[in-house]
Image (tube, grey):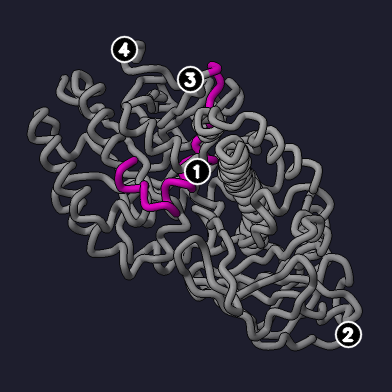
Amino acid sequence: MPLLFAAALAGAALALAGGEFVARRMSDATLETHLTEMVARSDEIADEAARMLVAANTDMAATCSELDLALLRERIFVSRFIRDVGRLDGDRILCTAAWGQLDLPTPLDPPDYEAPSGARVWTASRNPAARRITTDMVSLGRTIVFISDAAYDFMRNEGRLVFSYARSTGRVFRTGDGTPTRSLNVRPTAGGVLLEGRVYPAACSRRFDICIAVASGDRGMLGQPMPVVAGVGLLGALAGAASALAMTQWRRPGGSIEHDLRRALAAGRLRLVYQPVVRVRDGVVVGAEGLIRWDRPDGGEIPPDLFVPVAERTGLSGELARYVLIRALDEMAPHLTGPGDFRLALNVTTMDLLDPDIFDLLETETRRLGIAPERIALEITERSTAEYQQLAPAVARYRHRGYRIHIDDFGTGYSSLAHLGELPVDAIKIDRLFTRAIGTGAISASIVPQIFALAGLLGAEVIVEGIETEAQACHLAVEHPDALGQGWFFGRPVPARDFTI
């Protein structure tokens, strides 16, 4: 009897321990996914603010004239997240789309944060033009945008503390519960960031200097309803000696994205597809971009926007980069060593570019396969160019060897044009957000010629992403015949065996 009682207790303990393990693993995986979703929404807000600032700064109308205000109002009308947009003279607001010409120029308080690009940010501040309204503001050049407070509703409906902060400085921008942030700063630590003595899991944007952190809450069995805890213990007691087997089974399912990604990399289960890059004037294929894909066992696909950020913040970025470099060069070697100047573009992070092991690997693999460095392009996001002081020596090293450097998603970040001029690049890729407006007469379409003009000054090629219609392709062929294009109109991403020139 004592032995049976002891077995029952052991079974209950093991069952509860197994339940605790599963509950925490499931909670961790859910939290990781939720953080990624919140970062994606923050990216959308920052992206819209950045695009509006860039577009408004290129307007040719006289500042605060009726035409200028009309253009600003048109942008507000189609915006999801921007409440208002105005014009500045130094640190004073002259006019806004919503309030028109101000009777007196209204001074701005010192900004809470200044991005590497020169963009200035005010968080949870009183709108100088309407003091009863609290808003976030971002300025660049002569333009300031006011972000709708409703844009951050996703942070308020959590039932737990959520906050955003600057990755570069640790400065807290905003909290979901309205806690004042003036004196709040975080610092990186194991498992996330440390704020006022507590560790918060966090995730960061790949494009902007923005991170989101959230309280993990009661993740384990003690955070579950009491009937659930009691039921698990009872089942374990009844199972007795079989509880160890049960626990083994409970531990197997689930797992975090990081854990699964490590296993997928080790087993070689990630695959690459290649999308053609063409000359728009004649449709000739001149290169390809290698894109990473991760298939689920059920046949679905885990999007790169979900697992690549996980790789970056968990230290797997370098391993993922090495995996892509080795596989892509092997698979595309027949095209890269053939006649002509066919080029392969691969996405890398800032940390990859700064990692000397990645450079050495690229040198080793190109020599082994007989591929000229000029055939390889490394794509970094526009957000990365803001870190030009770190990147400049690495970029110079790669370009000295003949490798090409491309700026991806141009027009969606806070890249400083001055910094861009000091960071020599070979090509600028126009983001698909602008491609959709080509030939439509939309305001954002006016930015495209400005990007081509900038590229001309830098001596860089222009690659237009996201070309999906014949009208877009024809417009580019007529207006910008030297441009290169990429998109479903020219070809979808395919495995190397199906790629043809």
Q: Judge whether residue 446 is colored magenta.
A: no
Q: Earlier in the sequence, mark 2 or mark 1?
A: 2
**Residues under labels 4 and 1: Cα distance?**
28 Å
Residue at (50%, 74%) from the top-left corner?
187
Residue 495: image location, x then y, percent: 37, 17
Q: Is residue 32 above or below residue 304?
A: below
Magenta segment range? Answer: 298-320
**Where is residue 139, by image quadrant?**
bottom right
Task: For the residues labelled 4 and 3, say whether their Cβ atoms are less than 8 Å apart.
Answer: no
**Residues under labels 3 and 2: Cα distance?**
55 Å
The answer to which of 29 and 334 lies nearer the viewer is 29
Residue denoted by label 4: 497
Residue at (19%, 49%) from the top-left corner?
359
Residue denoted by label 3: 492
Callout in the foreground (2, 1)? 1
Q: Which numbered marker is on residue 4? A: none
Task: Say what secondary structure mark 3 lies in.
Answer: loop
Task: Say what secondary structure mark 4 lies in.
Answer: helix
Residue denoted by label 1: 430
Q: Mark 3 belongs to which amino acid? A: Arg
Does the image show residue 13?
Answer: yes
Label 4 neighbour load within 10 Å: few <14, some 14-19, many 20+:
few
The answer to which of 6 and 146 lies nearer the viewer is 6
Of all residues, the one furthest to the front in this rendering is 1
Callout in the foreground (3, 2)? 3
Does the image show residue 82?
Answer: no
Callout in the foreground (4, 3)? 4
Considering the whole magenta stretch, tell me its main secondary structure.
helix
Task: Say what secondary structure mark 2 lies in.
Answer: strand
